[in-house]
């Protein structure tokens, strides 16, 4: 089974990564494992 990320265009991947980083920054260090 391929990773789901491979099905996204590169631009969508970058946007999703940026969104993830912003989300983590918004939630704060408490969300990190």
Image (spheres, helix red, strand yellow):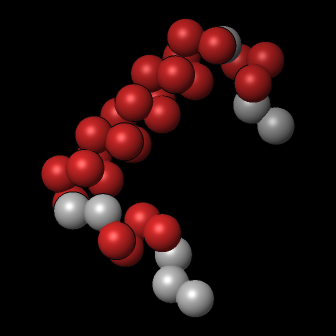
Q: Which residue sits at x=82%, y=37%? A: 33
Residue 19 in percent (x, y) is at 39, 30
| Residue 30 placement, left or right of 15 | right
Q: Which residue sits at x=50%, y=84%? A: 2
Locate residue 10: give its quadrant. bottom left
Name the quadrant of the N terminus. bottom right
Locate residue 25: give its quadrant. top right
Above or below, 13 relative to 31: below
Most foreground residue, 27 or 29: 27
- Counting labels gives 0
Residue 26 in percent (x, y) is at 55, 11
Above or below, 7 relative to 28: below
Above or below, 19 relative to 14: above
Q: Which residue sits at x=52%, y=22%? A: 23
| Residue 1 placement, left or right of 10 | right
Q: Residue furthest bottom?
A: 1
Q: Which residue sits at x=31%, y=53%? A: 13
Residue 24 in percent (x, y) is at 58, 24
Above or below, 5 relative to 13: below
| Residue 17 placement, left or right of 8 | right
Most foreground residue, 7 or 33: 7
Residue 12 in percent (x, y) is at 25, 50
| Residue 16 placement, left or right of 1 | left
């Amino acid at each position: 089974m391929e990773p789901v990320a491979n099905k996204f265009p590169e631009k969508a991947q970058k946007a999703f990564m940026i969104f993830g980083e912003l989300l983590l920054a918004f939630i704060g260090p408490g969300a990190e494992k």
